Amino acid sequence: MQGLLAGASRLPRGRSLKCRATRGWSLTPYPLTHMKSLARYVVAGLLSAFSAGTLLAQTAPSPSEAAEDEVVTLSPFVVTATEGGDITESTSGTLVSRPLEQTPMAISVFSAELMKDLMVLNGDHLTKIVPGLAAQNNQTSEGAGGNQQYASRGFTVLPRRNGFAPGGRLYDMTGVDRVEIIRGPNSILYGQNDPGGVINYISKRPRLRNSTGAHGTVTAVLGNYAFQRAMTDVDYTLIPGKLGFRLPMSYTYNERDTKWFSNTVVSINPSMLWRVFPNTELTIEYEYLDIETNFGALQPIVWVPPGQTKEVVDKNKRGLGRATNYTFGPYANANNKMTNWTADLTSRITENITFRGVYSQNGRDRDQVTPGGGDPFRVTPTPWFGVEDQDGNQISGYKGDLLFEYEFGPIKSRTVLGYEWNTNDYYFKQWRTYQNGATLNLFTLNIGYDPVTGLATRDTVASDYAPFPRNNYVTNSIEPSNTLGGNAYEIPTVTDPNNPWRLFRGPQRFTSTWSNTRISEVLSAYDDRVQMLLGYARGKLIQNYNQQSKVKIELGSTPIYQFGLGFMVDREKKHLLFANYSTSYAPQFLLDINNQFLPPQEAKGLEGGVKSVWSDKLRTTLTVFSQKRTNVGRQFTDFSFQPPRTYGVLSPGEESKGFEFEATYKPTKAFDVRLGYAYYNGKITGAAANEQFKIGRELPRAPEKSGTFSLNYTFQHSKVAGLRLGYGFTYKNDTILDLNNGLNSLTRRSDPYLVHWMTLAKDFKLADKRTIVVRLNVGNLFDKNYVSEGFTFGEYRTFRLSTDYKF
């Protein structure tokens, strides 16, 4: 534990990481002293975690106690604990645990075991295994602030944690048990919700067993680009059937081919499950995530070459090469800290009535320092000054649900009455360096700019940059503070003559409060041959409040509907024909040019399809859909103002139509094939009077064609018995990258890409149910150079060699 926590120490401002990433298979970045320093953290963490795991494993039950090792599940709101790669149930679509094949809607679930096998370590990597899901940014991998953001069926999706909407979140998979994905509008169960669907990260919880003992995994990973990861996940039943504790935690460090970039992630996720009474249990969860980043310029340059009129997406960055980092230099860095407390009380009041109450409090703070204002691509280069951004959220909320379960002859009824309340407090400040009332410039980059070609003749080196002075005005918290900077939404009242930083924009503080009152019904009838979903809710924006301008809006409740119907069309109950209609709404934080909040976004969708279990070897799902949304807010930077202003603009209408197909084929115990393909045709159907040119354009950062494929084979005989070989690929076509879909940005596009991966793993069985797993993962097998739909470079070929000790 101490070794893992040691890796969490922050890099002091003004100091850069001096290592250099190398392409190809190399575990020794430059210089070696830095590698040794980081290796100490990893080794210390692994030794402490391994020691703890070994001691705990001594109490693990023997094979003769297998019956006593059974997992005991009480709550109907929780999926029965899973320890393998396959999950057959979900809660995100109905609130209660239901088999996927009997749920009349498009829903997919991906387990922690599957994601670990494929090195899906954070939210950005999720798109490698989910067809139709696009990463509109790559915030977790880059260490940038703001929400992890996806697109599904062309529409935006912000992920949730255990059903709550934690704003500005970045996601690490250490404490994630599974990811459940619902496609299309669905606000019945979650109040305000994005029209693209629901991506619900379900956290790991203790598994209560009938015997005392520990189960878990200790993992060590090394790879090229200085990749290092130490992780442990210990699940301990302290009192059989009554009290359990779980502790997933990890330390991860990695670089990229971009100079000076590095990313350090520390994740700690303890939880406790206490069965207070035979029919009542309480779960307490805590999440801590610390991401420390030395920024890298992971995006290509967009510019208009001399003699041309159209933009180009330049992967060679005006002759400087993809690895250049002139934009940020060696001193730009950011720190993101996130915490989450969750308390979950479930009680089976009677044989037919269950209550669940959940409280969640999420906090996020970001402190980011970068150069600003400079431009080296001029005959007389423009100098750079310092910019510091500080922002964050506090979101708190609670949910209360009553589940009524009754049988009426051939009909089984599951009715949920629920209420949800949430508030989101957001703040923002931006500082710049000043001296004697004028901008204080820190450095100028002279890179041999050629005005004829528009190219540079040399890359930058560390000595071209100057460290940032320390800003002692900044308070990195939304809570009140007695430090010089005041709290997050106050202006400093005392001036420090030795501090060149001055408040440039803000402080801004917005508060949003919303609620959702709902009733939903899950009916199954005639031996599960008929499935029905019914839902009605009233979502209400209680307030959107700008603390500075005192602008406040209050909206009446918005009706939300859902109706889903499924029929087993054959006697063997192998084929479910289904249709589902749903609506959603989502209040928006964006302010227009007049500092007024944009109206809430609304959407409606219709989908239908068939879920088939052809045999115990083959399962397929085919879904067709059509959906629309209105009042789509997008952030727009207006360069007609000096300095440029950023505000929200409305796109009155967008729509998408298409289909999705998923299949799983397991002809033998040794063979496993998974296939997914998604296609949609999306376009903008309405625009403001001065933006009519957008009508008919495609939806941005959302590839219309995408697919995933994986094949795994486990050798059953000879000396290589137990050896697992895996291969797969991810495909996406190109898409427009400008989120605002500007008049001259049609050529700003991503690359179509087909990226292959490979895995090789071997299990070594030990006594007392212990196992050692050795695994090799190769990403981007053929080293493809491409720009992704998130407007960032895809990673070059990566090698990850890992060892798991399971007990």
Image (spheres, rainbow, N blue to C red):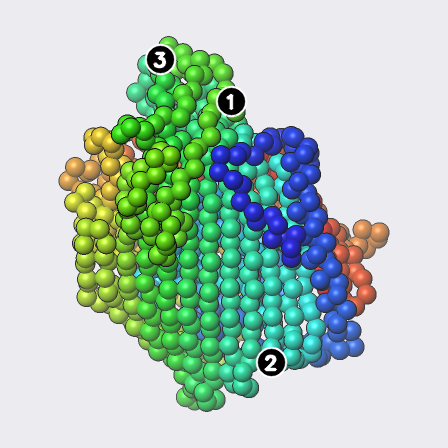
Tag on residue 245?
none
Decide which of 782, 215 is in the foreground and name it. Answer: 215
- Please tell me whether residue 654 is drawn above or below residue 797 in the rendered image: below
Amino acid type assigned to the residue bearing label 3 in the image? Val
Residue 91 in the image: x percent, y percent? 47, 69
Mark 1 highlights which residue? Answer: 463
Q: Pinpoint residue 239: horizontal percent, then vertical percent.
A: 65, 79
Q: Residue at x 60, y 63 (%)?
A: 247
Q: Give the labeled residue for mark 3.
A: 379
The outermost residue toward the right is 719
Q: Which quadrant of the structure image shows residue 372?
A: top left
Image position of 135 with respect to 242: above or below: above
Mark in the foreground, 2 or 1: 1
Q: Residues within 10 Å of mark 2 (few under 14, many from 20)?
A: some
Q: Secondary structure at mark 1?
A: helix
Q: Quadrant of residue 523?
A: bottom left
User: Of discs 3 and 1, which sits in the foreground?
Assistant: 1
In the rendered structure, find residue 242 and report the number of the disc placed on it. 2
Which of the image's four quarters has the C terminus? bottom right
Q: Earlier in the sequence, mark 2 or mark 1?
A: 2
Which residue shows up at 46% across the image and 61% down it? 340
Identify the secondary structure beneath mark 3: loop
Residue ranking furthest to the top? 452
Q: Count neighbours of disc 3 (C-alpha within 10 A) and say few if under 14, some if 14 to 19, many if 20 or more.
A: few
- The quadrant in which the N terminus is found is bottom right
Q: Work out whether mark 3 precedes mark 1 in sequence or the reverse, and give the earlier one.
A: 3
SS state under label 2: loop
Report the Cα–Cα distance between label 2 and label 1.
61 Å
Q: Amino acid at mark 1?
A: Ser
Percent x, y of residue 489: 30, 51
- 359 vs 274, left or right, is left
Per the model, the C-alpha gap separating discs 2 and 3 is: 73 Å
